[in-house]
Image (spheres, grey):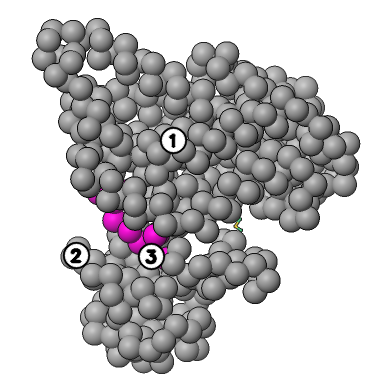
Amino acid sequence: MHRAREPLPSGPVTDTTYQPLDCGSLPVRLGAHPDLLDRLGPVTSWRVVEVGDGNLNLVFIVRGERGALVIKQSLPYVRVFGEGWPMSRERAYFEYEAALRLGKRDPGRMPAPLGFDRAQSMAFMELLEPHRILRGELIAGRRFPKLGEHLGRYCARTAFRGSDWSMPTAARKADLALFAANVELCGITEDLVFTDPFFDCPRNRHDPALDADAARVRADSALKQAAMTLKQRFCSCAQTLLHGDLHTGSVMATAHDTRVIDAEFAFYGPIGFDIGSLLGNLWMSALARPGRGGDAAAIASDIRWTLDIAQAVHAEFVAEFTRLWRTERSGILGGTELFESQGDADGSEATLAALLDEIRADLLGFAGLEIHRRILGFAHVADFETIADADLRARCQRAALSVGRELVLQRDALRDIDDASMRVSSAIAASL
Ligand code: SR1
Ligand code: MG
């Protein structure tokens, strides 16, 4: 474990021009860096493994006789696609800057940043051990009692403390300008989540058994209109600094701890986006559960647990956001002079209730679109992909598309998350 200390300033820690690292070159290229030597011990003791399984970057674990850390480096292209899809390496910079902010807004929920080298597009961070990626753990049927509390609180704290209800105008505008430059990663989300799944885009793929379902989605005018309305909110409703890609593959967990990783998609967008993406992925985990087999009681119990976690995330989000609203409101939209200072606590509570309604409708819509893009778009999820039986896999995905559509189109009518959860539960029951 590293010792507590300030991260290095964002500046070069190597004196060479950019080159992608590999396990062999890493000690040669970085082995003279005093801070790494201090943390890891002599370079002769370093053992390096590349563990990146995401879509974009290289990720190395480096262990030495004195400690261990993670080194993450961006490539000038999308890793899973190859050099035919160029992508700015500056995503490493945005991830580092986002991690500093999100980590301060909910301390302890992200890996500690240990340093950054912009020229090398390379960040050093705390190694999370024995944490595992949540998506795989859910597929394996593991349970995490603190998950709902930790993630709901994370979503609330980062949302509130990065918003106009918390930040003063100068800092907020400077931050908006900084993250507005994360254009390529925003562009990926704009295309892959909101547009591609809803037309015959060459990047898309889907299970052949879903041909008719894909065609139906792409002819569904109401759904496409809603996708464009939600895209418009994503692009122009800069409510808070988002993680921007908060799915179950961006969470690492143990029984007692939960961490959020991979904030390279960070930008100022609608509060409902992160929590919507997270809930969409938890609901997909439940929707895919029948595909993993087991007796009916075990399947039902796993589904119930996962749906309860999604509800707990939202309940904790609402509770913590409400607490922060009542105790920390101070920014551009602080507004206590209009309400509390005039003895009008009801006005403040009504404003909060309207905001929470708006966030809930947004998050349901974003969750429904996230479900669509993971089945019909470019980036699929292991929850469905690992279901071996083709017929069962298609039935699970079809149920997901059906409830995803309801979430999008009924987002204003669904007045609480329990209603949404019941829709997911009914769709699963209908798929069996
Ligand atoms: C080209 S990147 C595809 C997807 O992977 C990331 O994790 C994001 O979810 C993105 O949409
Ligand atoms: Mg990622």
Q: Which residues are magenta?
A: 92-105
Q: Is residue 29 magenta?
A: no
Q: Residues within 10 Å of mark 1 (few under 14, many from 20)?
A: some
Q: Residue at x 47, y 89 (%)?
A: 25
Q: Nearer the viewer, residue 297 or 383?
A: 383
Label 2 CB, ligand 2: below 8 Å?
Answer: no
Q: Magenta stretch mostly in which secondary structure? A: helix
Decide: is 186 above or below 392.
Answer: below
Q: Nearer the viewer, residue 136 or 23?
A: 23
Q: Is residue 61 left or right of residue 109?
A: right
Q: Residues within 10 Å of mark 2 (few under 14, many from 20)?
A: few
Name the residue type under label 3.
Answer: Tyr
Residue behind mark 2: 6
Q: Which quadrant is the C terminus positioned in?
A: top right
Label 1 CB, ligand 1: below 8 Å?
Answer: no
Decide: is 337 above or below 46.
Answer: above
> In front of the other: label 3 or label 1?
1
Mark 1 or mark 2, earlier in chain: 2
Name the residue type under label 2.
Answer: Glu
